[in-house]
Structures are given as C-alpha cells and as structure tokens.
Amino acid sequence: MNLHRFLSTIWPADRHLELLSGNERQRVAFLLSPIFAVFTIITAIYSIITPWIYSTPAIPLIASAIMIIVFATGAWLVQRGAIYVASGLVCSVIWLIVTFIVFFTGGLQSSVLLNYVIVILLAGVGFGWRGIISAVLASGTAISAILFLTITNRLPTTTPLLESPLAYAVTMLVILLLAGTILSVADIQLVTAIKATRAKNIERERAEQQLRQALLAARAGAWEWDAVNRTIRWSPENYPLLGMNPDQDRLNFRTWIERVHPDDRQALQEAIDRAIHGRQEFAVEFRVIWPDGSIHWLRGIGQPLVQPDGSVQGMYGLQIDITAQKAIEIELARSELYYRTLVEDLPALVCRFRADGTLTFVNDLYCQTFQRSRDELIGFNFYELIPPEQRERVAADIALLSREQPTIEHEHEVIHPDGSIGWQRWVNRLLFDEYGEPFEYQAVGMDITVRKRAEIEREHLLRELTARNSELEQFTYTVSHDLKSPLITIKGFAGYIERDLAAGRLERIPADIQRIKVAADRMYQLLEDLLNLSRAGRQLNQPSRIGLGLLISEAAAAVSGRLAERNVYLHLPPNLPEIYGDRTRLREVFQNLIDNAAKFMGDQPNPQIWIEARRADLPGFVLVSVRDNGIGIEPRYLQRVFGLFERLNAQVDGTGIGLALARRIVEAHGGKIWVESEGLGKGTTFYLTLPEPPRHEERVQGLIE
C-alpha cells in the first residue's frame, strides 16, 4: 500500500509521457501486460527451484525477488498508462541485476550475460527502435567495461554462479523462455497488426470507393495541395469536370488554371490568397471552358491545413459541378426579372404578404398609392392601412383561402396618406411551395374610389328620387284633395249666397262670405307652402355668415303670437356659434321647428323650448338641437314626421309641409336633420347640422354645394 501511494504520488495516471499516440500506447500496453505476467510466473517458478540447483542460492533468490517486484510494478504502471515508465523501470533493473551478477560471478564467462538479450528485446517492445539502440549501447558499455576489467585483472575473484550443468541448463532455459515469451507475444501482435492493417486497408478501399461513387454522383472532384512539396493531388473525378480525358490529358495547376474562364481567374486567385493568408475557408464559384468551347460552372470549397505555429502546410477540398444549378438560378433570375417587370408595368396594385399580413413585396404603384417607399412597406402589416372596423372582415375573407378555394375577391376601404378614406378591390391568391404547402399570399388590386363614390352618389340620388316621387305622389294627392277641398267649400257657399240672395235671406250672407274667406286663406297658405317647398329644393340665396343666436331670435319673433298664446318660454343661450348659408331659408327652418314645438305642447303647464349648439363630429359643421317638453312622439312615428303633408295630430292646425320644408332646406345646405323622442309625454328633440363659415372665401360655394 505504501509503494502504491508512493508511485501514485511521483507518477499519477494522467502524467505519463505523451510521446505515443492513443492507439500506439494501447498496442504497447497490449504487448507488455502479458510479457510482465509471464515473466513474473517464470521468475517465481525459478525462485522456487533455486535452492535445489544452487549450492549458494542467495544471489539468485535475491535477484528473483527483486525481479518479481519489478515485473509486478511494471504491470501496475502499464495499467495506469505509464508505458515508458514501466518499460524503463523493468529494463533498467534487469540491466543492473545482470551487470551486477556478471561482475561478481565469473565475468564474461557467466551465462547470465545472455540476459542482456532480454533487456534489448524488452526495450524494443517498450520504446521501439530507439529503445533497442539505447539497450544495445548500455549492454555493450557494460560488456566492454567487464572486458577491460578482465584484461587488466581487476575483476573480483569469485566463485562462478553456475556450479553444475543442471544450474546452467535451468538458467539457459529460463533465459530462452523469457526471450521466447517476448518474441511470441511480439509475433502474435505482429500477426494481429497485419490482420488489422489488412482490414483497415479493405475498409479504407471500401470508403474510398464509396467516396468516389459519391463524388461521381455529386459531380465533384477532390484535391489536395501540399505547400511543402508544392504539389497538387487530383482525384480522377476532376477530369470530367474540366472536359479532360484521364488517359490522354495531364491535370496539374497549369492545365487547371488554363481551363478557368479568363474573367474569373482574378477572383479565383483572390479567394485562394484569402484562404491561405487569412487562414479561412476557401469558397468560390467560377467558370471553366471545355475543349469544345462550352462553358461550365464549378464551385470550389476547401480548408487550409494550419500548423500550430500558424504556417499553412497545405489545403484540401472539392470542386463541384454546379452548371445545372446555375442554369436554374439564371432562369429563376430571368423569371424574377420578367415577373417584376410585368408587375411594375401593370396598372394595378400588387403585393405579397404572409398569413399575419406582413408585406414581403410591393410594386411601384402600391408605393405611390400609399406614398411610402418599398423599404418602408416591406415588413409592414397591411391591415394597418385598412380602417379598424373592416380589418376583421378582410382577415376572415383571406382565411377562407385553401387548396379547394385558392382565390377570393373582395372590396374594402383603405386609409389614404392624407387620412381620407378610399376604396380598393382585391383578388387574393394563396401560393403553394414545391411540396404543395401554402407559404404566402399574392394580391392584385385596383383603386375603385371614384367608382364607389359614384355608386354612393347614385344610391343617394336614387333615394332622393324615390323621396321626390313620394313627395310628388303626395303633391298630386294634395292638389286633388287638399286644394280641391277649399274650392268645393267656396263653390258650395257661393251657391248658398246665390240662393239666399234670390230668396231675400240677406242675414245669412255674411256668415257664408266668412266661410268662403277662411277656405280661400287656407288655400293660399297651402299654395304658399308648396311654393316654398319647391323653391327650397331648386335655389338658394347668396350664402353669408349668420349669427345663430340672432337668426333664432328673428325666427322666434315671427312666431311670437304662437309662443305667447301657449305661454311657451324659449331658452336661448348667449354666444351661439356662427353658421353659413341662406339666411332667409334657414330662418324658415327654425321658425317651423319653434312653431312646431309650440303647437305640440299639449296640456303641459310649464311649456319650454331649449336651443343648444356645439361643433359637430363632422368637420366643418355645427350641431344645433331644438328640444321641448311637449307631448312627444311615439317611436314608430319618428320616420314619418318629415313626410310631405304628414300630420300626426289632426286636431292641430297646419298643412303638414313645415317639417318637410325644413328637411329640404337643411339638406340643400349639405346638412342633416333628424328627430328623437322617448315616447308620449317625454318631449321631442330635433337635431340638425349646418355648415360653419368657411376659412377661405373662395371655398364658399363649394361648402354650400
């Protein structure tokens, strides 16, 4: 245990000499382990029989004991990986013991001298040819020294160790067994090594054959440049890559560089220089010209062999035929150029995008439409160009695309750079890769803002025409009924007057004349309202700035009799904004609204009307409200109040034209009018939007239009 600890201290397992490679150490250990084991057994047997063959067995027994310890220690060191230490220890101890015994037991006449052969053989196993030379020199030195001492009679006078033929024979047998063990183990190892070498050669040939087949399949050739000897080795697969015949042509650097296209030689040389001087990977694509004049593309790749001192020992690599790949790349580039040219020349918006809406391609018209550069749009999400309320619908349409339905058409609004809203029509297509998997979307669109606005205007005109036709029907009915009714009254009472005059009943004539006058007044009012309604839709006076508060005061003054009659209080706040339009027509609007509110107060004990105004949500307009606490309107009648000749309460006087007239005047100013009520007894509120005064006088007429 102490010896083990001592040896572990002076020579740990990880400190053995690194002069041998891993495989070489395994081979030497494989040789030394059985040799030391057999040596230990033979030496042990020899030590057992020593007392029977020697009369003075002390020296052989001591030597045997030392050798057994040395062989066991050597075996332990071999297991620890300390091959050189084990070999050196065993050889040194044997040499010392042999030299000692020879010196004191007969000199050069001692048969123990043959043990130097064991030392030389062991040194050869452990250290190779260097060990053999060292052992021969050491043994020769010892023999020379003993020879010198023998000649000069300086050797000590001792009794020869081998006193009998039996001792001599046993000693020689042991020496032969030890030498035979070394030679047998070495022979076995040699045969094993030869078999392993043959197997490796076969495996290497198989690997080389597979490599050649792989190179042929890949149309590639291997090469190796030796910087020391300034030579290049080329595999046979390089010849067809250059249009050369291996049986007729010789491939070297000169013939190789001659095949390279003149325009590519400089770039090729620069790539080689970068790899050598920069100690980096060699990679370059270049053209070669075959003897028949055809041009082929090669890709050269390689890796420099850099020594620990930084010098380049050489470089190895491949050159691969990429002519077919280059042809595909060139064709793809042409197709891409053709596609881009076609897309750019199309009078349509073209884009490509991923499933999340990220743009991957846009054409020039797309950039022009949204006034952004291509770099700004690539990577941008096109959903941000769509109003938020329409994004979900557009995404749902695109999500419908599949193999069964690869295209879909839809229209949606877009946000222009100036914030205005436009319309676009798109045809979206789902694109598939070479494996049939969807990977991208392509869309072709066009701006349909003008068409869409025309459609909206057309729908507006159709609705207006429908309303006009409805009013015309009402007008026809009025002419045939409401206008005829006063005429019938007039005609009837005129007949009464005629009969009363004939009968002399003059006292009844004033009453009949009064009834004729009332019918004529009603007919006049009806005709006046119809005339105002007709003019409101066809012409307006020159627009001007109007103080809303003053305008409403004038309208209230015009119906002051009605307000006083119903005891209605009008709330008119100060500092009302200005509006812009036809003063006369707008006064009629508020006059009708205030008069209408006063008429429909019902039995309200505290009738009131509130006027309010603020800036409308629609830019350039003012929102005005006229609210009362009158009888209110049932929700089902809210859409009828602006109808021509609509009178929801026949007990209240009027022609049913006032609110229709108000709506036509407001719409002629570009505004809107509507009514809200929570029901009977909850009051009514009329809302209307009217234009603000323009900021620039030249826009006056445009606002009115």
Image: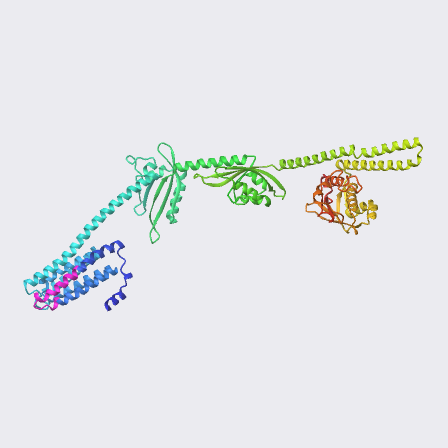
Q: Is residue 345 magenta?
A: no
Image quadrant where one finds the C terminus: top right
Q: Is 41 positioned to the left or the right of 574 in the image?
A: left
Q: Position of residue 309 (x, y in %)?
A: 34, 54
Residue 415, how many percent across, how many down?
60, 43
Which residue is found at the position 36% from the left and 47% from the top? Answer: 303
Q: Nearer the viewer, residue 686 or 580?
A: 686
Query: Hey, which quadrant is residue 25 in on the image?
Result: bottom left
Instruction: In this rendered view, identify the residue nearer to me: 58 or 305.
Output: 58
Predominant SS of the magenta segment: helix
Look at the picture and state if 287 lies above or below 677: above
332 relative to 386 in the view: left or right? left
48 in the magenta segment: yes
Whole-percent x and y of residue 519?
A: 84, 36
Give the residue furthest to the left. Answer: 165
Specify whether 15 is left or right of 682.
left
Position of the N terminus by quadrant: bottom left
- Left or right relative to 612: residue 270: left
Instruction: Give, as a single range, the part of the protein colored magenta.
Output: 38-60
Is residue 565 in view from this perspective?
Answer: yes
Q: Quadrant of residue 504?
A: top right
**Residue nearer the viewer, 484 or 107:** 484
Q: Residue 132 location, x and y as percent?
A: 18, 57
Image quadrant where residue 419 sits: top right
Q: Is residue 234 something that shows in the picture? A: no
In this view, 673 is above or below 75? above
